[in-house]
Each structure stands twice: as structure tokens, then as C-alpha cells.
Amino acid sequence: MSRYKTKEAVHNRAKDAIGTPLELIYEQCGQYDANPQSKNYVGDAFEAWMDVPKNSRAEADLSEAGVELKATPYKILKDGRPSAKERLVLNIINYMNEAKATFETSSFANKDKLMELIFYKNDPKNKDKSTWTFDEAILFSFPEKDLEVIKHDWETIHDMIMQGKAHELSEGMTDYLGACTKGASSKTLRDQPFSDIKAKQRAYSLKASYMTSILRNYVFGSQTDPAIQKDKFSARTMSHSDSKCFSTEEIATVDELAHKGLDDIIRDKLNVFSGKTVAELKKIFNINISKKTKQLNSILIARMLGLKGNSANEAEEIQKADIQVKTISLKKNGKIKEHMSFPTFKFSDIQNTDFEDSDFYESISKKFLFAVFKRLRNQNPSDDEIVFIGAKCWYLPADDIKNIELVYNDTKRKIQQGVHLKSKINSNNKVTVSNNFIGSSDYSTDGTKYIAHVRPHASLSQYFEGAYSNELPVPAVWSGRPDDDEHYDPSGRFMPTQSFWLNSTYLNEQIRDVVNAFEKNSSETSIDK
């Protein structure tokens, strides 16, 4: 049993580890056979330092002190800012037990309400983990405002369990507290109450975006909160004048969050302005910039949310929840103008990565905020001819993620076997090249419509090594390769860089409720007049 029996003793002991190479930490704890190649090397070093044997108990690691121990990595971005390397995985969710719990009696509250978080830099240039050090530690409980969001997140997860839908859980459903897959593989399954369908094993987790906010503001920044202790309990509070505070704005108050979920607050704040034209919104918020400015919609969304900055991404809640703010533009007929793109990918990354480990999966597992504008005239509409019709927070349902997984796996298989390329001469006597990746109008063999597709992000195409191409790990299988080695590499190793896209037809279905609500309100307003 650990000798550190109070939260004060736990925190002060953790602070004493700062700056000591992990190899020395093991030696000081009398452990000389620790393997730096072990994936648990860092976490085990922290537990050894805290005199805690490895365990999987339901209560906190240091039960007498009521403190859970967590070692968590961070990285430094190119702009010099620290960022969480990954989500903070907490305890496994036992669906059978959690169904009987309230938030206050849940396994999450029992194990994770007070944590000693110790941070270390995961340095890709230094593979020798024995030389790594712990860089900072905080005794962490949830700030009052964050706790309200987390309670709502827990209720969302709990409701899915109570409905017999644990197999449909998705990280995009929640804001700060997620339910991430956890196990030997993503196929590890568990029983759930109220359904015979086995659900993927999941664990509570704090999203990487939330951890990044904590890291920047409280760990390496100067922001303080009564719930977070950074200095030793025996030391005076330091000024940290050399620390950088990454300031943010707030969308909601503690009182608002106590009565309503974050998604509802965001939606309601925006929908107050439903029916206003861009010209009217610019007048309301005293915005004097051209509609041609790419930032305009971003600024309008921020102002409607009550923010002073030029982007909703600057809001504390948006950052912590990693909500992806997307402007959707509708044509006069109410249809979405274009598909939704995701970042470009490298063919070699797809070839070697399973779907649930991919960057694409991480992107589509997030929550989205759709702000929908409609054009009253398709060509060059004025500010008076573009209307904000409403907004919604949205995430991809589990069944739709399975549909997208089919697209991903098909793309992976074709990259591994060799992408098929076919050239032809178009009506303008120019060469066009098609490939066999899934397109926006394609169906699966069983007649299911795909909701995503693959195509280039840029309008320029290159079949040779260049800024707009990417190397294929397996040569492409050409049909009619043009006799032009300069522009069509004979090795077949290059083709235009690709992206995954969500189909516009699918997105139309997802925002149908926003459009219908706007049309209903518009109709009722006309009748009243």
C-alpha cells in the first residue's frame, strides 16, 4: 500500500519527479529491469514513483487519498504551442454495472473525479524513453463549468446504454467526455443490458482537444482555477510571469450549462438569427467587410454566438470539445452546393493503417457544428440574397460510420493491389484520366448507396512526381497510358493526391430538419403578416 495517503502528499510527491530521467526514477524505486521498449514504460515509472503496484481496481489508484494517477504525453507544434498527443483514457465502461448507476455513483465519478496528472513530452526525435522526463504535474479535478458539460456527456452515454444502444456509441455524441474503443483490438466485445447485441468495449476518456486546453491554460499557462492545483501545497503561489496564457472566449455560463446541454445552448444562440440575411447580420454586428472576404461567414457565426473574435474556433467550449465548425451553403433550390472535404491523405498511410486507427476515422468521429446559409440567387448573390436559415450540432451515426468504413477499406484494398487508371480523349481533345476509387454516385454490391467517396482536393492533376501528386506504394494499373513520359510517369507510381469526401446528397439529408424548421417558421410568419 502506498505511503502517500492524502491528496497533498500525492501531489507533492509527483512534483518531486519533475525533471528526473525515467531511468533514474526506476533506479530510485529499486527497479533495475524496466524495459524502455514497453508501451507501459512511462506510466509504470509514475506508479513506481508513487509506490503503487500495477492494478485494475475499480477505485482510484491511491484509494486512501482518493486520487487516480495518470501519465499523459504532449507534443510541441511547429508554432511552438504545446498540444496533447492523444486523448486521456480513463476506466473501462462495464455496461451492465453502469446501467444501474447515477452520475454520482458511476465508475467514472468513483475513479476519475480527482486525478494527479503528470505530463511528459513524447519526442519523436528521441526514441530512448529512459532519458525522457516528467515535465509538469497538476492535481486535477474538473472546473465547475467543465463539470456541467461532463455530466451532460455522461448522461448521453448512460442514455445509450439504457436504450440498449451501447453498440451505437460514438465519440462524436459528446463534447469533453468520450467513450473510446478500448481492448486488444477494436473488435473486443462486451455484453450490454437491454439488448442481445454485443457492444465494442469502450472506456471513458477525456478528448485530446480538452486535454490540450488544460495543457495550454493550466499546465504551461498562467490560468488558475480552484479545482486545479499546480504548485506544491507547501509552496507559495508563483506568478509564472514567464508563462504564456492562451486566452479564449466563452459561449456559455455555468448557470446556462447547469440547465441545458452545450449543443442546445450553441444551437439556440445561433437560431435566434434564423431568417436574417447576411446584410442584416452585418448591420446588427456592425461588420464592414465585403461578402467576398473568406472570413465573413466565420465572423458572422462568432458574433451570433456572442464572441468578440473572428472565429467560433476561438471559444473555450469549441476548443475543448473539438467541435468542427462548418458553413454549409445551399443553392436556391435548397440543395447543398458541394461535397464536404477532409484533409488529403498519403497512399502509403492508407495502405498500412486500419480504419479505426486512421486520421480519417478520427476526423469523422468528431462533433460538427453546421451553420446553414441559403442563396436566393445562385450566381453572384448580394448580401441581401443570402439568408442564414439555422444551425445544428451533428455527429455521424454508428451505422453511417460503418458505411464509410466500406469506402475506406475499398480504397485501402485498391491501393494495395494497384489503382486502376484509364485515359481517354474528351470533346475538347484533351486527355482525361479516371480511376477505380469509389465515386459520389456509386453503390455497393448489395445496392447500398455509399455516403462518402474519394477524389482529388485540388483541381490540378499530376501523374508524375510533383506538388499535386502522391506516390503510390504499388504501381497503378494503366489502361491506355498516354505516350508522354514527362507528364505520365512510366513507373505508374504517381497520381493526384486524394481526399475523402462526404457526399452532398447525404449531407442534404442530415440538415433536412434545419431546412424544414426554417421553411415552417417562414410560412407561419407569412400567415401572421
Image: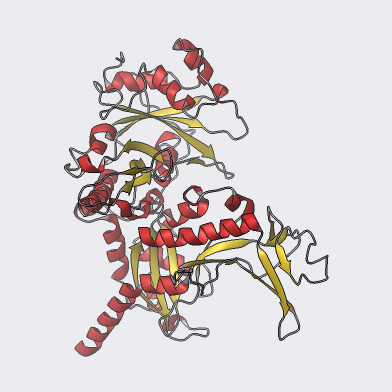
Query: Which x, y percent locates residue 514?
Result: 32, 73
Residue 13 vertical placement versus 479 (above, below): above
Residue at x 66%, y 59% (from the top left corner): 418
Q: Which residue is outermost to the front?
A: 446
Residue at x 37%, y 22% (from the top left corner): 54
Residue 483 vertical placement versus 12 (above, below): below
Tell me the colour scheme of the image.
secondary structure
- Direction from residue 463 to residue 92 in the image, left or right: left
- Direction from residue 240 to residue 130 in the image, left or right: right
Residue at x 42%, y 34% (from the top left corner): 219
Residue at x 50%, y 71% (from the top left corner): 339
Image quarter where the N terminus lies is: top left
Front in this rendered view, residue 233 or 364: 364
Residue 468 seen: no
Query: Which x, y percent locates residue 247?
Result: 42, 46
Front in this rendered view, residue 77 or 93: 93
Residue 489 vertical placement versus 352 (above, below): below
Residue 232 seen: yes
Query: Which x, y percent locates residue 280?
Result: 37, 77
Image quarter of residue 401: bottom left
Image quarter of residue 9: top left
Count the numbered circles shown: 0
Query: Which x, y percent locates residue 42?
Result: 47, 26
Image quarter where the C terminus lies is: bottom left
